[in-house]
Image (cartoon, rainbow, N blue to C red):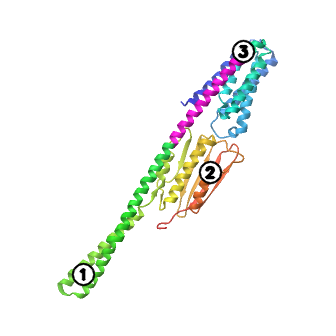
Amino acid sequence: MRIERWLVVAGFGTWLVSALPAMLRIAGGRLSHGEAAVFVVAFVGFGVAFGLLCLERQGPWRARTVRTALLAMQTVAGLTMIRSGNDLFPAATLVVVAGQLDELSSRAAALWVALQTIGLGIVMLEHMGAASAIATAGAFGGFQLFALVTASLTTRERRAREDLARANSELLATRALLVDSSRVEERLRISRDLHDTLGHHLTALSLQLDVASRLTDGKAADHVQRAHAITRLLLGDVRDVVSQLRVGSRFDVASALRALTTRSGTLAVHLDAPDVLELDRGAHADTLVKCVQELITNTTRHAGAHNLWIRVDSNADRITLDARDDGAGAKAFAIGHGLTGMRERFEECGGSVAFEGGDGRGFEVHGFMPRPRSGS
């Protein structure tokens, strides 16, 4: 089980256990009906908000504004549980909230912890003296900072693993392209050498034998004609070999894409591509690989997604690339250097690419390029 799953389990366990003393007092009738009702509502509200934040599937709760609102709901619910239950144990839920603040910037997370600590101190003033309230709030403030730092370190470690996995995948994809490039260049060199040297010499020999067959007669003429026929046959064989070498001089993009999407950390990349996708021009192959690489990088760093679906299709006329993720998305997004480079690559190959995004519904990319023709 991933460490993030253990943290979720620990959060739910803390939520349940911290409310147990108050629940026992409610069952024993030691809390008024009003206090009991408020406590139960706050308890359920905290659980719902925490559960929604932990959901990995796509939905409105993936939007950044909604997630911030759910964090605020947990904070309010935790403080309400402390006040209505006349109990300090629910203060542990504030530590759970602090452990989820790694989604925010460092400054915003620190301010959030400070506000929670101040709120806890104010609530505790109703039940104890100022010195005890300050000491209690300070202690839980330290617990919150510890949880925040732990969550931040866990996030950094996860991102480091993802960067390493992504770098390894990119290296494998680049190696696959280099192997294909070396193979293609060697095949083209051999085909050119056969055509330019052996082919020309055989053509010249065939012409000379044709002339010789006209100038000789008798048995010598028969042998010359046979030699001429063998030369024509050999020249045809050389041309067939040259054609086969040129046909085989293509880039296998599918293998490079599979190497690129094999592992990407916690992001699950689902690739739908033909088993074999061979292209005659390296620029088209490089565009597809580099654009898929950029999609994986952007999704990992910015989308907060758990799944990325990539579909590459090809027919006689065009190659299409469609991708979507289950990240938070955004109402408005800026076209940065990565997306600009992707657009330029498609346009250089005679195609185009479009980007779509929405708050809470992920990010989509749709691109196409004309399929390169043999010998173009």
For badge 3, the amino acid type reads Ala
The reply to whether the magenta stretch includes residue 111 is no
- For label 2, the residue is 337
Mark-to-mark CA distance, 1 and 3: 111 Å
Left or right: 215 in relation to 321: left
User: Which quadrant of the view contains residue 231?
Assistant: bottom left
Q: Relative to 163, say whether 340 is above or below.
A: below
1 or 2: tag closer to the N-terminus: 1
Mark-to-mark CA distance, 2 and 3: 50 Å
Tell me which segment is drawn in magenta.
137-166
For badge 1, the amino acid type reads Gln
| Percent x, y of residue 203 | 32, 77
Q: Residues within 10 Å of mark 3 (few under 14, many from 20)?
A: few
| Percent x, y of residue 180 | 43, 55
| Percent x, y of residue 346 | 58, 58
User: Which quadrant of the view contains residue 6?
Assistant: top right
- For label 1, the residue is 225
1 or 3: tag closer to the N-terminus: 3
